[in-house]
Image (cartoon, helix red, strand yellow):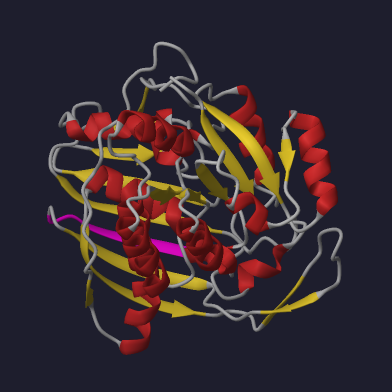
Amino acid sequence: MEKVKIGILGLGAISGIYLKNLTELFREVEIAGIYDLIPEKVAAARSEYNIPKGYSSMKEMLEDPGIEIILNLTRPCEHYDTTRAALLAGKHVYSEKPLAATYEEGRELMLLAQDHNLLLGGAPDTFLGAGIQTCRKLIDSGFIGDPIGASARMICHGHESWHPAPEFYYQHGGGPMMDMGPYYLTALVNLLGRADSVVGMVSKGFDTRTITSAPLYGKTVKVEVPTHVNGILHFENGAVATITTTFDVYYDSSASLEIYGTKGTLRVPDPNGFGGPVMLLRPEDGSFREIPLVFEYKDNSRGLGLADMAKALREGRDTRADGQQTLHVLEIMTAFEKSSGEGRLLALETAYDRKAAMSGDKIRGIL
């Protein structure tokens, strides 16, 4: 297969693992060029990963006929403008989460991609890893019977104690649901299918945050978004799930995701990772037992969804981390706050069909 040429837009904290995996792990893609507002970042990345081109502007990158897919790693509040520009330039786009800061913006991007016959999709791609794919096989094979419900929790006190530039987590497009919710909700819809309605309650525990990480130690950030979000989801298959994401709580563990069925319970590994322990409880066992992972990509494999998009582009098939999925998750996330403000249950309008499960790769890095 001819390698798909990728252009990376933005070189923030998440870019390192993408650069590593797209140059060392996934063999059917090639980073053709990169752009960031800070030229020093471009120069450093080009040197470390042997990237042929560094662009002087986003416009220059988007005008390069050699670029097929734009990997959008800009800040969440910038995703709409940058993805829209890339689509208008005729580029397929794989975006970091969320797809956009509002559901309306995300829907507009989807319609634009469809009008121009372009692929649009994005993170998270952790659901394609060995952990959640093993869980999907167990559920689809009937090991927990018919799904009844689920419980998801992401509990922490925010990112200002460790992240080098944490302001955007508390600005438009940020918050615990928009930041961490995509991992949990993407896992849930992949395991349970489409959600058809939600209800939410949101709050904000602190009006300001003080950064204690370098290099912005001591800077005070105004909190503009809800930082404690509780939601209930009803799925088309009848299952009911609860989710809590918070930046307000001190706690000793952050990740929890369980799926409940008529014949057993499944503890899903941290959906922010690709591997982790899969634990199954069936009544005949009386306690949880660990299930071996039966798929590839259990390490940090960010870029897996992009590699799948590249393969789909060449083969003319559906991409797994597609725009339908990212838009459905975006509608769910934003509906929680809307439901809280309006004090009512909201029906969801986005369609969602689970894409094909992963199959075992004969050669690691070739899907």
> Which one is in front, 125 or 47?
47
Residue 231, by quadrant, is bottom left
Q: Which residue sits furthest top?
A: 362
Q: Is residue 105 above or below residue 307?
A: below
Q: Position of residue 38 (x, y in %)?
A: 80, 56
**Is residue 194 shown left or right of residue 114?**
left
> Which one is in front, 196 or 363?
363
Q: Position of residue 121 (x, y in %)?
A: 41, 49
Q: Position of residue 154 (x, y in %)?
A: 49, 56
Q: Position of residue 192 (x, y in %)?
A: 23, 47
Q: Is residue 119 above or below residue 318?
A: below
> Which one is in front, 300 or 208?
300
In the rendered picture of this protein, how many numbered marks are placed on residues?
A: 0
**Is residue 137 shown left or right of residue 15?**
left
- From where the camera sits, is residue 4 visible? yes
242 within the magenta span: yes
Q: Quadrant of the N terminus?
A: top left
- From where the camera sits, is residue 286 visible? no
Q: Residue at x 80, y 47 (%)?
A: 41
> Which one is in front, 142 or 300?
300
| Residue range of the region highlighted in magenta in the rendering | 238-245
